[in-house]
Amino acid sequence: MKGRVFSSAALIAAMLVLGSVLCFAKDYGAWLKKVPQEDRERVNPYAGKPEAAAAGANLYHTNCAKCHGENAEGRDGRPSLRSEQMRNATDGDLAWILKNGQMFKGMPSWGGLPEQERWQIVAYLRTLNPPESGSSNSPVSAHETGGRR
Amino acid sequence: MQRAEAQQEPPYFVTYSSVMEEPGNLEIENQNIAAAPKNANAFFAPTVEFEYGITAWWTTEAYLQGQVTANDSAVFTGFRFENRFRPLPKDYWINPVLYVEYEDVNGADKSFLEITGNTSITTLQVPNAALRQEVERSIEGKLILSSNAKGWNFSENIIAEKAVNENESWEFGYALGAARPLSLTASSRPCTFCLQNIDAGAELFGGLGTRYNFGLKQTEQYAGPTLALNAPHGLTYKFSPEFGLNDNSAGVLWRFGVSYEIQQFRDWFRRSK
């Protein structure tokens, strides 16, 4: 009897853990809450530079498209990079997630790429998600980058 | 459109950095070493390596090794199976990685994938037939520390190895590396020989003796520059001459390798959503 109670409790606990892990795993925006304020406020030195966004498009297609899709539409359960969340994220937020990744949720750290290249990728991502007017992030139009759509 | 391969991985042959294989990717690498040590026959030792990213924090790898010695024979020398774990969730100023390996190699192994304990290049004077009689099965742990700053990568490895089929003491070794791409910004035009696709650096590695005889005495020590070209279509070419730093070491070890990365290999086995 004692054994059955213990087994049931263990099963319920395992299901709760698994459930919360699965829910948490799908909460792609949770990382935004982890970005330190000073990182969030960082300014992209390449903001508004079409050349940098075009270089970022090349880097994106080399390093990121295999998971996030050629058009950043998301692929096989991996998140789309064209979203409201991305639009609302600052350049600093995007640079932070590129550097740190989300190691335990499948996104590797890209801290091994030079910082300048990470900013170039951010410049490209910004062209996919131009911020609302009035934001400090300067959009670069998709037309200007020459990247794939 | 031709695009160069990812530039994350430093151009090291021996030193490990904190860069893991991206989850779902399979990298197949052929790395080779050639040398003509003094008073021993010249040799060529190829290694085939399969590296797979299980998760963003866990990479697993298998090696198959062999060698050909002039005026002697060609032999299969064994295999290695290793796992690397990145325990911390973010990128820090110094990133630790834990490494665990099981190896089953015989004494004829000349792959120089790492050096531990007290060794000398003079053992290579012994014919393969005799060397291969001695089989060592061992477990090995490495503490990998790696930092990225201003485009540079600095990596330090501390190695501890223990034979499990022989009564040998713990053996130690180390490897240090520093490297950076020749350009820190990407070009807006896809290109093969752009500076951003070329990584240059240097490595220093060698043995640190055993538990009872710790230090640099009676150890092999090597240092040399290393160069990698991240070419289009997932190919990377690497080259390094490594120079022996003491009388126990070979004069020069010539290394060259080529690797091919199959991106999202695991997608081959899952239905598209």
Image (cartoon, coloured by chain):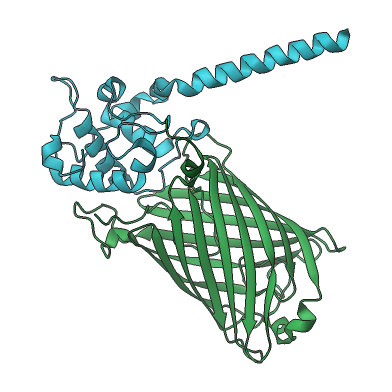
Chain colours: A cyan, B green
Please state the horizontal and vertical placement of residue A107, each as a whole percent of the image: 45, 35
Please state the horizontal and vertical placement of residue B197, each as a whole percent of the image: 32, 60
On the picture, is B49 further left or further right than B102? left
Q: Quadrant of residue A3?
A: top right
Residue visible at 87% across and 9% down in the picture: A2
Residue visible at 44% across and 55% down in the picture: B261
On the picture, is B91 further left or further right than B87? left
Query: Between B32 and B172, which is closer to the camera in this rendering?
Result: B32
Q: Is residue B209 above or below residue A48?
A: below
The quadrant in which the C terminus of chain B is found is: top left
Query: Between B175 and B230, which is closer to the camera in this rendering?
Result: B230
Is any part of residue B222 visible from this angle?
A: yes
Q: How many numbered badges does the structure rendering display?
A: 0
Q: Quadrant of residue B194?
A: bottom left
Q: Is residue B208 above or below residue B55?
A: below
On the picture, is A66 further left or further right than B137? left
Is any part of residue A64 visible from this angle?
A: no
The quadrant in which the N terminus of chain B is found is: bottom left
Residue visible at 56% across and 57% down in the picture: B50
Residue visible at 62% across and 81% down in the picture: B68
Please state the horizontal and vertical placement of residue B209, each as a whole percent of the image: 73, 67
On the picture, is B22 further left or further right than A134? right
